[in-house]
Image (spheres, helix red, strand yellow):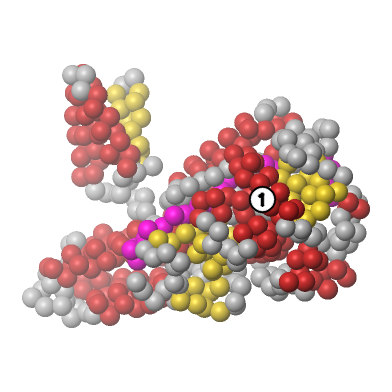
Amino acid sequence: MSDFTIYNTLSREKEKFVPLHPPFAGIYVCGPTVYGDAHLGHARPAITFDLLFRYLRHLGYKVRYVRNITDVGHLENDADAGNDKIAKKALLEQIEPMEVVQRYTDNYHRNMDQLNVLMPSIEPRASGHIPEQIEMVATILEAGYAYISNGSVYFDVEKYHQSNPYGQLSGRVLEDLLATTRELEGQQEKRNPFDFALWKQAEPEHIMRWKSPWSEGFPGWHLECSAMSRKYLGDEFDIHGGGMDLLFPHHECEIAQSKIATGKDSVRYWMHNNLITINGQKMGKSLGNSIILDDMFSGNHPLLEQAYDPMTIRFFILQAHYRSTLDFSNEALQASEKGFARLMKALSILEKLPRSPQTTIDIDGWETRCHDALNDDLNTPVMISHLFDMVRQINLINDGKEQVTDTDIARLGLKLSAFIFDILGLRDNSIADSGSTVLPDVIRLLLDIRQEAKKNKDFTLSDRIRNELGNIGIKVKDGKDGAEWEMG
Ligand code: ZN
């Protein structure tokens, strides 16, 4: 279909993307744990894999994109006693754990929508897949690669390592792990400190608990992804993604569990996005620099000089390659804001360019270069530099120094909007508040027609107008003085 190459974290090489069952492509990405507001750290994997999702669809694949919601809030590590993060938050706020989950899932969805991140094809929740997880534990136990200890079940890493390489993805050597893993309190249940829990018996005060053959408890941290990717994408699937912070132990454990449960290497391509730093510092709650997305968008944070539009954030993230580190600073964000405005301005003058009998710029060559960059492991910084080359060409045409035909303007407009809006997933938020009154006038007209339809009890028409507007990102709100609208 194309020569799309992906850097595979496992082989440490760029490989041509060949899906198992073309034209289908399956992606699994580790989603958020929902016990707090979505922050900058959530934005990067979401946008990286949204780009992958969009690009594979653009290439013609039928993509099934599964991104989970971790709503069984996992413990910091197997030795943590007491409640998980979600239950802790529930106790603190005196609400049900599932209310915590709902609140922060809604918050995550709202922020992702602002960043123009598409909803995945399937968004399974860990708490909705307890039977599948219990079944997987039972299979691994039966195969002899896990043991029961005090009502909990642990994966036997040493035994697995005798016939399968453990640590290959993250480049860790088991012998070194053995030497460096601290003996943590509560780990006496394990044969080896690097064994990991498949099932944990719940302490009496633990709220989120389920019945199992071994104890009343909850699944281990890594199990949900193995169980849910298998359920929705099969024993073997194309791409598994996530942040680099999940390489070890999470993904390493997933590989081991899935291998024993299915007898197969479940993932063809492992993709990891690099992490975000703020003013050169690692981001973290304890460092006081973990900025939530709502604050980024409002500017309400001591580290921020101003509010940043979600599209500035998205554009900024895409201006770096997903495998590079990305440092958030006001200076860098303001540069992105200007760059994005320049891109949008070029688009807005495209329509008004003077038409010539011939075209003197190379549109096809430019398009190929844009595709080549994306095909090279989603090299968005290079692709965006090509977009700016075209911005310069457009300005030259506008100044009468280059020429373009009427047909080529239309062709170029389509290609630019495919790259900028469909693939990079950017959105022109300025339409609603730009000098142009055409769009607001048209929307007003549609709302008037809708008002009339409601008066005539033609709710099919009135709902259709609201829904169709919603589909193109225009939200209609009914108030007592008639309907109002805003760009989603
Ligand atoms: Zn995962």
Kindly tell me whether residue 195 is visible in this rendering: yes
* The magenta stretch spans residue 60: yes
Local secondary structure at mark 1 = helix
Magenta: main secondary structure equals loop
Q: Quadrant of residue 475?
A: top left
Along the viewing direction, whichever of 357 and 24 lies nearer the viewer: 24
> Which residue: 23% across, 44% down?
439
Residue 114 on image: x %, y %: 45, 47
What residue appears at the point 72 percent right and 58 percent down from the top-left corner? 143
Name the residue: 53% across, 74% down.
7
**Which range is magenta?**
54-82
Q: Nearer the viewer, residue 82 or 352?
A: 82
Q: Which residue is mark 1?
A: 136
Image location of residue 418, percent across then percent down = 30, 62
* Extreme residue in the front direction: 142
Q: Quadrant of residue 444?
A: top left
